[in-house]
Structures are given as C-alpha cells and as structure tokens.
Image (spheres, coloured by chain):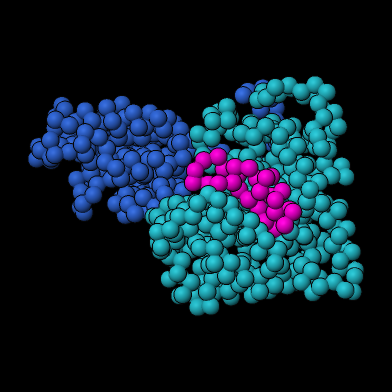
Chain colours: A blue, B cyan
Amino acid sequence: MSAPATRSLVVVTAGLSEPSSSRLLGDRLAAAVERHLREAGLEPRLEVIELRAHAVDLANQMLTGFPTPSLQAALDAVLGADGVIAVTPIFSGSYNGLFKLFFDAIDRDGFRAKPVLIAATGGTPRHSLAIEHAVRPLFAYLRAAVVPTGVYAATEDWGRGAVATDGSLVERIERAATELAVAMAPQPSAAPHDAFADPVPFEDLLRRSSTEA
Amino acid sequence: MQFGVFTVGDVTRDPTTGHTVSEEERIRIMVTVARKAEEVGLDVFATGEHHNVPFVPSSPTTLLGYIAGRTERLLLSTATTLITTNDPVKIAEDYAMLQHLADGRVDLMMGRGNMGPVYPWFGQDLRNAIPLAIENYDLLRRLWREDVVDWEGQFRTPLTGFTATPRPLDGVPPFVWHGSIRSPEIAEMAAYYGDGFFHNNIFWPSSHVQRMVELYRRRFEHYDHGPANQAIVGLGGHVFMRKNSQDAIREFRPYFDHAPVYGGAMSLEDYMAQTPMTIGSPQQVIDRTLGFREFVGDYQRQLFLADHAGLPLTTVLEQMDILGSEVVPVLRREFEALRPADVPEGPPLHPRVAAVRAAASASPATPAALAETPA
C-alpha cells in the first residue's frame, strides 16, 4: 500500500500574549481539520506560525521592502500551504495590526484561490460580526477561497459545554473544519508560476504592449 | 572592469549637525563629486533622475553636459533615466547631443523610477509602467539607428518621416543598461536586445540580486548575443570606510538611522548582514566587493553610492580618496586576475573613447594613472 497523499495545513495566529486565546482557537481548528483530512485518507502536515515572533521583522519589512530570512520562511510556508487557518484577535472592531502587516506582505498572486478558514477571538460576543465585515474582505482582496463558516470565539465561549449543540463554539469549529478539509481534498494546485525560472518571452511582452495599453 | 560612483542627488539634512544644504549647493556637490571621481582615477559618474523633492537632478543631460566640459576622460552615465515618463524622442536627442559634447564618453541606464505620482504628473499611468518601458525603449532604439522613422504606438503621437537630431556621434548610439531591482521583465528586455543589466545591489539581499542576474545571463544566451558569462553586468554598492571598522560604523550610524532610503527600521548591523552594504575598513570593502562575483559571475561595472544621506562634502571626498587610493586599485588587479579571457573586461565603449584609450596606452609618455585604468 502506498503512503497516503499529504496536505499541508498552516495556522497563522496574530495572538499577542503567550499563550493566547487566538492560538488556542487555531489549535482547536487545526486538530479538527487534521481529523477530517485523515478520515478522507489524507495525511496532514501541520505548521503553526505565531506572528508575534515576526513582529519586528514585519515592521522592518514594511520600511526596507524585503523580508528577513525567518519572515521569508513564514511567508513561503503560507504560500505553499494547501490550506490556511488565519486567526486574529479583534482590536478596535477589526483584525489587529500584526495580522494586517503579515497579509500585506503576502504575494497576492501566490495566494489566489487558496483555501482559507478565517477565525477571530474577542472579549465579548458583541464583536462577532467583525470577522464578516473586516476579516473576510481582506481575504476577498487576496482572492482567497474562504470557507463559508468563519469562527469567532468570545471569552465566554470557552466556558460553554463541550457538546456540539447548535451554534456552540464546538459546533462552529466542527462545521468550519469540515468545510476547509473538503476544500483541501482535491489535488493541490500546481506551484505558483515562477517568473524567474520561466520568464515571459520578450516578443510576447512587445506584442502585449502594442495591443493592450 | 569599470569603477565609479552614482548619485541620487538627495537633499537630506545632516543628522549630526542639523544642517541642510541648499539646492544650489547640492547641485555643486554633484559636480564636485564627478570631478573628484576623475581625479582619483575612477571611470564612471552616473546621476539619477528625479522629479520630486527632496531630489535635485531633474535634468541629467544639463548636469552631465556641464561635467563633460570640466572633465577629460570620465565616462558619464545615468542611474537611471526614466524610460517610462520621458518622451523617447527627447531621450534620443538629449543623449545624442551629450555624446557630441562629451566626445562619446556617454552611456545610460534605463529605469522606471520609484515615485508613483511622477506618472500622472507626466501624463502617464503607473499601471502601464512595464508596457511604457517596452514601447518607449523600442522606439528609442529605432530613433538612434534609423535616420528616418515612421512609427505608431500606444503612448505617444505617431511619427511620420521623423529624424531625431543630432544623429548619434559617428552613427554609434550610446551603450544602454537596464536597471531593475525586482522586475524579471526588465532583465528579459536587457537580454533580448543584448544590452547591459544593472542591479543596484543595495536595498535587497544578494540572493535576490543573484536571481535577477542569472535570469538576464540565461536569456542573453537564449537570444544569441553570446554565452551567458559574456553578458554585460553592472552592480551598485554602498560602502563607508575608515581605517578601523568600528570608527566607520560609529561615524556612519546616524546617517544610516536617518537616511530616508533605509527606512529607519532595521539596525545597521542587521542591514549589513542581510544586504551587500559594507561599513568598515577598506580591506572589508575589498573582500565584500570581490565576493560579489561569486553570486553574479564576472561583471563589468561597479558603482558605489558616494554622496547621500546628508553626508558632508568633505567626508564624501575623503571616502572617494580612500576608494581611489586603497580600494579600487586592488579591486582592479584582483578582478582582472580572476576574469576569464573570454569575458569582456568592460561594457562596449564608443569608438572615439576606445581610440583615445588605445592611443594613450600605446604612448610611452602616458601618465601612470591613465595606464592603470583601462576600460
């Protein structure tokens, strides 16, 4: 019997404390996605990226224009993933600045059609729609394939029961994880086009410039 | 191999004194730096072109024309000429004119600029940057090579029966480099025409510089201009030197921390570790610069950033003295010893310049400084 096909899953969390509830939510989501992938006969490869560790590099990248090697490795991991779980705390009604810095640094073309599960944490359930009004449009700009269920966890959700009753955090995690695992199941898309390995021939560039403009 | 300096012509406050030079002073400094380049035995002076403050060199051929009249053998170049927002007809005429006044001591480097609003200010659209570079340069080449041009394109008025004047000196257009930090299309363009490719080699890690140059070399060969190792490559570089490296770092740090181009973000030490910038002793600069050939191959031109970030003129001139006396003579010797015989020692020279140099090196009365600085 051949080894099962693998799927790479990357959790990006912008939680600021250690441990953070965003990381906690990311771990729960990842575990659920891994379980669903295994049930589908796929072997998950999980990587967790704590943006906290890249905070200074992200600020530097904005100003110098190039990433440090460790930030580049994190960006490459996300671009190369078959699925991404993106978790941010909600600050002032939106994702936090650290989360935005990271996705500003992502190559948009490389992110196209990437299966993404969006998730957020906050102190109160009153901010739950921030995930729909702020986080989802960011990934719409990146042309990601965001799964329908976004998971928002307020502090009080962590004190609710562990049974998947309708609308509970456990149920929402399960629903979103199923959706992401399904999106990740088809053959992974080919590696993004490398303009250095395979440049557009100049004759085509010349022709394009005389027909497009 | 050629060595020289390039300038962006920034008016920047000296963070150690609070003094900011006037535009007039800044323009004079650029002229002084160019003349100093010739005096200390460098080969090339290149100026940027900018149409936004705090930069002064908006009119490169005015500046270079004046410098041509005040120098004897210095090659005059640009870093870069805006092929996107300038009218290619005006570039063709301005630089042909400069060729005549400078006895052929002219080449130039095409670039796309780094300031978005310059495009609308000159009636263009930033989103067309690459198509503009491609169409304009294709026209520029024809204007220099064909006496009468009929042309129609997307971005400028059509031409019927047009002759750019004056014609290039002796019918030989200036050699052209294409500069780009990150666009593979520009490396591809340089390769297609068999022109030179220049990477500024300052703001990005060397792994990235290597990818750009490797692409250019591979495609140069693909387009039948010769083997990849014979493609014409130029690099920038940023150095600051004192006898003791710690003195260099101490003196340069406030300029690095406040220089707009470096962002005021990363520490000087981190920046040096991640980019080719070298602040240290002359020997460190020699070692690091010789190391460039390990990731781009044997190359033909090395330009150093000299006057910028508010450094006082006296300091800039001291740096050029160190370059001319301690660094470049060693680099010339070492690079020449490493260069395979089939790799060009420099970019093509205008036949007038080549003839002058051949005569100078053949003459027994040649001053030593001239004999030591072949193209």
Residue at the spot 55% in from the left edge and 39% down from the top edge = B51
In what quadrant of the picture does the C terminus of chain B appear? Answer: bottom right
> In terms of image quadrants, where is residue A32?
top left
The answer to whether residue B258 of the structure is visible from this angle is: yes
Q: What residue span does the magenta drawing correspond to?
A: B44-70
Vertical order, B58 against B103 (above or below): above
Q: Residue A168 location, x and y as percent?
A: 15, 31
Depth check: give the residue in front, A109 or A166: A109
Residue B41 appears at what percent x and percent y? 71, 67
In the image, is residue A57 part of the stretch drawn in magenta?
A: no
* Residue B159 against residue B215 in the figure, above or below: above
Q: Quarter-wise, where is residue A152 in the image?
A: top left
User: Residue at horizontal 65%, vertical 45%?
Assistant: B60
Instruction: Say which of B129 and B104 sits in front.
Output: B104
Figure quadrant of the N terminus of chain B: bottom right
Q: Foreground residue, B310 or B151? A: B310
